[in-house]
Image: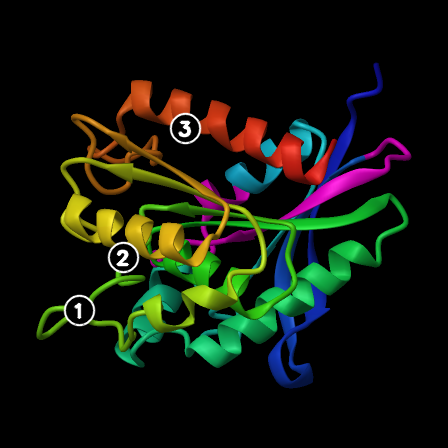
Amino acid sequence: MFDAMQAETISLLGHGGDRIEGYLARPLGPGPYGAVVVIHHMPGYDAGTKEITRKFAAHGYLALCPNLYSREAPGASPDDAAATARAAGGVPDERLVGDVGGAAAYLRGMTSSNGKVGVIGYCSGGRQSFLAACSLPLDAAVDCYGAFVVGTPPEGFPLAVQPLLPIADRLSCPLLGLFGADDKYPSPEATAELEKALTELGKPFEFHTYDGAGHAFFSVDRPAYRPEAAVDGWRRVFRFFETHLGS
């Protein structure tokens, strides 16, 4: 079994033809491999997100995480870049779609690609994963506790976002949702509302909510980490991507 992999910083074309930074991890075998666009969480393009990107490569996927804050704070630390982006109200939805679309095109253009691309996101990236799946032709999408797909942010919330339920009818691919029963954003009531809407629209999806878990239960370096939920969540993610992306 040939299991070597390579990870590196690259440049790719994002929204509007802008040149942005990305982190690419890939198996070094000939493939063909399915591919995953990893959307980083609100704290930014950080070491934890790069580790997740490498994890997909280790499981036989081409994986690319675009730096969504490339324009606001080029060369800045993840914390500083995230603070700058947060002060500006976050990443505009239109730009997010363009950047994810550019990452997907980069992955499809690789010689070891099988042509199938999925997307996964955590926290704000979970909402953005849903947004991308409603705006781009994708093969699979995973939403890890993405807030405000349903409902609007409370007063004073740092991100200027709108609910995505009005565009749920455009969902282009199967969706996996992983949530915590103790989370407030999204709350179990919000995920139930989204589940009802997707069922009525006839969209393919599966949702799992973990008791005893709140927001960010995948984050191994935060107090919110819940090992049992995270281990089961990863198992479901890889089974879902194997079904819809191959590899």
Q: Position of residue 73 (x, y in %)?
A: 45, 74
Of the 4 image quadrants, the one containing the N terminus is top right
Can you see residue 18?
yes
Does residue 110 appear left or right of residue 7 in this picture? right
Marks 2 and 1, how far apart in space?
Answer: 9 Å
**Badge 1 density bin: few <14, some 14–19, many ≥20, Cα 10 Å:** some
The residue under label 3 is 233
Q: Residue at x 58, y 42 (%)?
A: 53
First in sequence: mark 2 or mark 3? 2
Marks 2 and 3, how far apart in space?
Answer: 18 Å
The residue under label 1 is 153
The residue under label 2 is 147
The magenta-colored residue range is: 28-50
Q: Position of residue 31 (x, y in %)?
A: 86, 35
Q: Secondary structure at mark 2?
A: loop
**Badge 2 density bin: few <14, some 14–19, many ≥20, Cα 10 Å:** many
Q: Position of residue 19 (x, y in %)?
A: 67, 76
Does residue 116 appear left or right of residue 68 in this picture? right
